[in-house]
């Protein structure tokens, strides 16, 4: 490509002298005035001499054939071939069958028609956004050596035209860069944008507009209005004033200007628009409403419902969190409500992706590109099916619970294949029969479902009947969530000590939401998380932890402080509910196999004095450290009577941990009339202290 030829040359040849110059930008009257209702009185064709691009920011007219032909017709004969090479380099002529003549070359199938520069407060370029025709967008950033990198990894995200925003007291927030340019170039007003309706509104944008008078002008469609409400809610506590103004008779600011709108007319519209009244929402009531909505269609316990409701809000605010808890929706049998729960969640969560089976490539690429709330059904079939997909899914779930988690895959074709890291961080709910893989279950809050008991009724789920209810709740979540994002980002909620470190990671964003909501939710959700996660720890603990619990039980039952190895093994295989009686190919566990299992906790047999003998064995003190580290007591209190019902028909009220009622929704822990723990149960011991029919109830679950 010959650098002597530029789009400035094309514009000058076709359009003559420019109407205006602004730094690297040259403005001409549009060559397609018929596309402008006012004949393009205000110049709107912009040539960027730095990027060497041109386009009308109103109608999109670009390097049309006639303009190029006019340019070519004025080129010296000796430069014809150089012009042809220049055009070929830009994809404007194919170099084989097309001729550079007075008829002009054919238009490219796809070309850049506008470039939008994003700079920091000092004007230093951070990245560019290119608009293509046919319509499309791409992003790039400087590589520091005069070239470009086609992604925005590590780039600071800022508002468009940030230097002007910083210097202005009055700012228009519009949906796209084109409208922001219209505000400046046609109305002489400061305009900015945080991107399209699909882009997130970041805390950094809110901070840049703090203390300013802001007018938010949405595109006249539902996605635009939704984004505008989120922006207004976020700015309401930071900006000096916020107004939400939808322009009459136009889809956006640019079209309104093309229909004759002026700066004075816009000022009058703003003056007659009330200051935005921030929706002061009751977060606790919203969570209550969400929980009640979910329980209309699915038979859930109180704890399960609370966690599900908080998780729904989390999907709308997960960008404020460093970790995301999964929901492990499982059951022992089919027809227990797993798919139905996913269907209900799909109507509420942000950016849902409900799927049962996709290819490994689609799974990683869609999560990386869209950050969806993944609602994965029939995970048991996925993990037990095709090996490549099962391993990819396992890898996505193992890494996707924390910000920065990636899955590495091959990308490209043929000799250009390279590896690429795909982000796996997104909210996920996984449903299936049986247990999830241990590494996935560790990152999840368990929602263990059972078939509804006889006489237990839930409302039939029909999308067409509930669309309005779901839309109302979702709009409230978006408004409330948008207003608390900054609070959630800075939140450091108190975490229950009964949870493991990984469970605490997942619980943190849910508890931050509960704390922001207030009311009964902060303590009730903590009780719910402890109840569900502690139960999972009991049910899913490793065989070595099970061994530690059983050894502790044997020591306590015998009331002695030492055992010979052979006697301890014999006492263990007498526990009917544990596997030690058939541990070794159907035979009882031996002292040698017992020693190998205990060695992982640095517990080794040694000589112990028992009477006048010193056999190899163990003392109680040998186990104290391991018991303290791996066996913990979770204490949960409830201010409600033990006969509370958890049926779907029960109104959603503030409850503590569930009691055992006619609706058996939680795994059994102990009979309510029992005052002593079972001596040989797999959970080690559960008991109620205090009156079994009222007052304060304490449940101790050995984890």
Image (cartoon, rainbow, N blue to C red):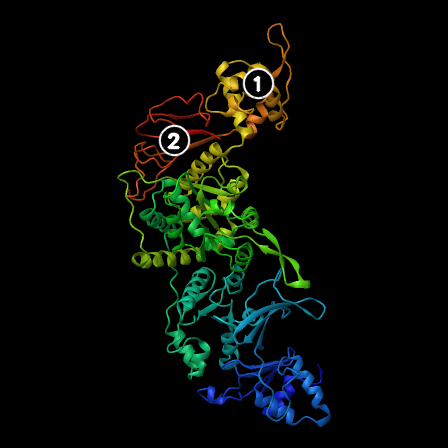
Q: Which mark is residue 668?
A: 2
Image coordinates for residue 267, horizontal then vertical, percent:
42, 77
Identify the residue at image location x=68%, y=66%: 143
Badge 2: residue crowd in 10 Å (few <14, some 14–19, many ≥20): few
Mark 1 lies on a secondary structure that is helix
Instruction: Name above or below for residue 590 compared with residue 337.
Output: above
Task: Identify the residue at the far top of this view.
Answer: 612
| In-front residue for pair 629/596 | 596
Q: Position of residue 562 (x, y in %)?
A: 57, 14
Q: Position of residue 378 (x, y in %)?
A: 45, 47
Q: Which residue is mark 1?
A: 620
Examine the rendered structure and indicate whether residue 345 appears above or below residue 614: below
Q: Quadrant of residue 642?
A: top left
Of the residues tagged 2 and 1, which is closer to the observer?
Answer: 2
* Residue 255 at x, y percent in the picture: 44, 79
Look at the image and tell me whether residue 251 can be seen: yes
Up-down relation of residue 127 to residue 383 (above or below):
below
Sequence-earlier tag: 2 or 1: 1
**Residue 62 as seen in the image, left or right of residue 228:** right
The N terminus - image quarter: bottom right
Out of 231 and 685, give the one closest to the viewer. Answer: 685
């Amino acid at each position: 490509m010959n650098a002597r030829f530029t789009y400035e040359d094309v514009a000058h040849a076709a359009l003559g002298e420019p109407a205006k110059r602004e730094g690297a930008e040259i403005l001409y009257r549009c060559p397609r005035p018929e596309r402008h209702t006012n004949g393009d009185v205000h110049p709107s064709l912009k040539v960027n001499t730095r990027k060497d691009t041109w386009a009308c920011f109103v109608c999109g007219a670009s390097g049309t054939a006639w303009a190029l032909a006019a340019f070519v017709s004025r080129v010296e004969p000796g430069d014809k071939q150089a012009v042809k090479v220049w055009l070929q380099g830009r994809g404007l002529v194919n170099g084989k069958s097309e001729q550079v003549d007075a008829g002009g070359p054919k238009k490219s199938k796809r070309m850049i028609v506008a470039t939008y520069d994003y700079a920091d407060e000092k004007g230093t370029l951070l990245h560019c956004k290119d608009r293509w025709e046919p319509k499309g967008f791409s992003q790039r950033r400087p590589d520091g050596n005069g070239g470009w990198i086609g992604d925005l990894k590590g780039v600071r995200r800022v508002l468009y035209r940030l230097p002007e925003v910083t210097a202005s007291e009055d700012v228009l927030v519009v949906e796209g860069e084109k409208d922001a340019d219209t505000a400046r170039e046609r109305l002489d007003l400061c305009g900015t944008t945080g991107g399209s309706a699909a882009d997130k509104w970041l805390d950094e944008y809110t901070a840049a507009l703090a203390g300013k008078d802001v007018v938010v002008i949405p595109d006249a469609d539902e996605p635009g209005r939704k984004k505008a409400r989120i922006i207004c809610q976020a700015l309401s506590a930071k900006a000096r004033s916020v107004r939400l103004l939808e322009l009459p008779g136009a889809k956006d600011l640019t079209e309104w200007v093309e229909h004759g709108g002026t700066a004075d007319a816009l000022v009058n519209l703003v003056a007659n628009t009330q200051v935005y009244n921030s929706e002061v929402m009751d977060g606790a009531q919203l969570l209550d409403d969400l929980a009640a909505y979910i329980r209309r269609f699915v038979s859930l316990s109180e704890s399960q419902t609370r966690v599900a409701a908080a998780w729904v809000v989390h999907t709308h605010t997960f960008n404020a969190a460093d970790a995301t808890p999964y929901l492990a929706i499982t059951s022992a049998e089919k027809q227990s409500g797993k798919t139905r729960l996913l269907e209900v969640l799909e109507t509420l969560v942000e950016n849902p992706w409900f799927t049962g089976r996709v290819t490994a490539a689609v799974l990683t690429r869609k999560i990386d590109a869209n950050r969806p709330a993944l609602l994965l059904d029939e995970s048991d079939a996925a993990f037990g099916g095709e090996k490549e997909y099962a391993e990819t899914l396992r890898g996505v779930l193992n890494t996707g619970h924390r910000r920065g988690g990636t899955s590495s895959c091959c990308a490209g074709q043929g000799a250009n294949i390279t590896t690429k890291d795909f982000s796996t961080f997104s909210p996920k709910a996984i449903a299936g029969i049986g247990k999830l893989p241990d590494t996935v279950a560790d990152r999840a809050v368990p929602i263990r479902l059972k078939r509804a008991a006889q006489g237990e009724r839930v409302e039939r789920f029909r999308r067409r009947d509930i669309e309005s209810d779901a839309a109302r709740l979702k709009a409230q979540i978006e408004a409330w969530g948008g207003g608390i994002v900054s609070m959630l980002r800075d939140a450091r909620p108190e975490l229950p000590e009964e949870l493991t470190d990984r469970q605490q990671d997942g619980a943190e964003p849910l508890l931050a939401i509960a704390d922001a909501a207030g009311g009964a939710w902060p303590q009730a959700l903590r009780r719910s998380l402890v109840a569900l996660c502690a139960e999972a720890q009991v049910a899913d603990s490793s065989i070595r932890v099970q061994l530690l619990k059983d050894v502790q039980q044997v020591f306590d039952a015998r009331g002695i402080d030492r055992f010979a190895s052979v006697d301890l093994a014999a006492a263990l295989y007498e526990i009917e509910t544990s596997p030690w009686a058939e541990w070794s190919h159907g035979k009882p566990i031996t002292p040698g196999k017992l020693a190998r299992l205990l060695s992982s906790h640095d517990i080794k047999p040694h000589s112990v004095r028992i009477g006048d003998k010193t056999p190899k064995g163990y003392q109680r003190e040998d186990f104290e450290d391991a018991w303290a580290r791996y066996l913990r007591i979770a204490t949960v209190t409830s201010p409600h009577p033990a006969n509370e019902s958890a049926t779907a028909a029960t109104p959603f009220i503030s409850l503590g941990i569930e009691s055992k009622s006619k609706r058996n929704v939680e795994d059994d822990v102990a009979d309510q009339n029992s005052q002593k723990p079972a001596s040989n149960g797999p959970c080690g011991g559960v008991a109620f202290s205090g009156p079994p029919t009222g007052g304060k109830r304490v449940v101790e679950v050995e984890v």
